[in-house]
Image (spheres, grey):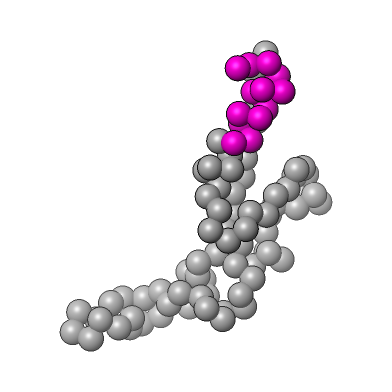
Amino acid sequence: MKKNVKFKVEVIDNSLGKGRKSWGDIDPASGKVTGSYGDKHSAGIHERDSEITEANGYTNIVTLPKGCSPNAYISMRMKEIEKENGEN
């Protein structure tokens, strides 16, 4: 029997501004970023702002190391779940 499994992914960035990518418009003459969209459009959200918490009903919460593909992790977990359920 197929098990209904859902995954939610959020990009977490706890760098507090240090090392965050600049977002804005590229000046074609200088190649530099001009304008700024501020922290609103950063590479991710701070962990404290995450919706993925036990208090919000999420279970089996996993934080992947930097550089690890969420898609690869989900594929691996789905294969494990299928194996556990005898769905090879």
Percent position of residue 54, x then y: 80, 49
In this view, the residue in front, 1 or 86, is 86
- As displayed, is residue 9 above or below residue 45? above
Relative to 21, say whether 86 is above or below: above
- The residue lying at 60 percent from left, 67 percent from top is 13
Q: Is residue 37 shown above or below 64?
A: below
Q: Is residue 38 left or right of residue 33?
A: right
Please tell me which residue lies in front, 44 or 38: 44
Quarter of the image containing the C terminus?
A: top right
Count of numbered badges drawn on the protein: 0
Quarter occupied by residue 11: bottom right
**Residue most toward the top?**
1
Identify the residue shown where x is 63% and y is 54%.
64
Please, which residue is most extreme toward the left here?
Answer: 29
What's the magenta region?
Answer: 76-88
Tell whether position 77 is magenta: yes
Q: Position of residue 46 (x, y in %)?
A: 64, 67
Question: Residue sitting at 58 percent across and 43 percent down?
Answer: 73
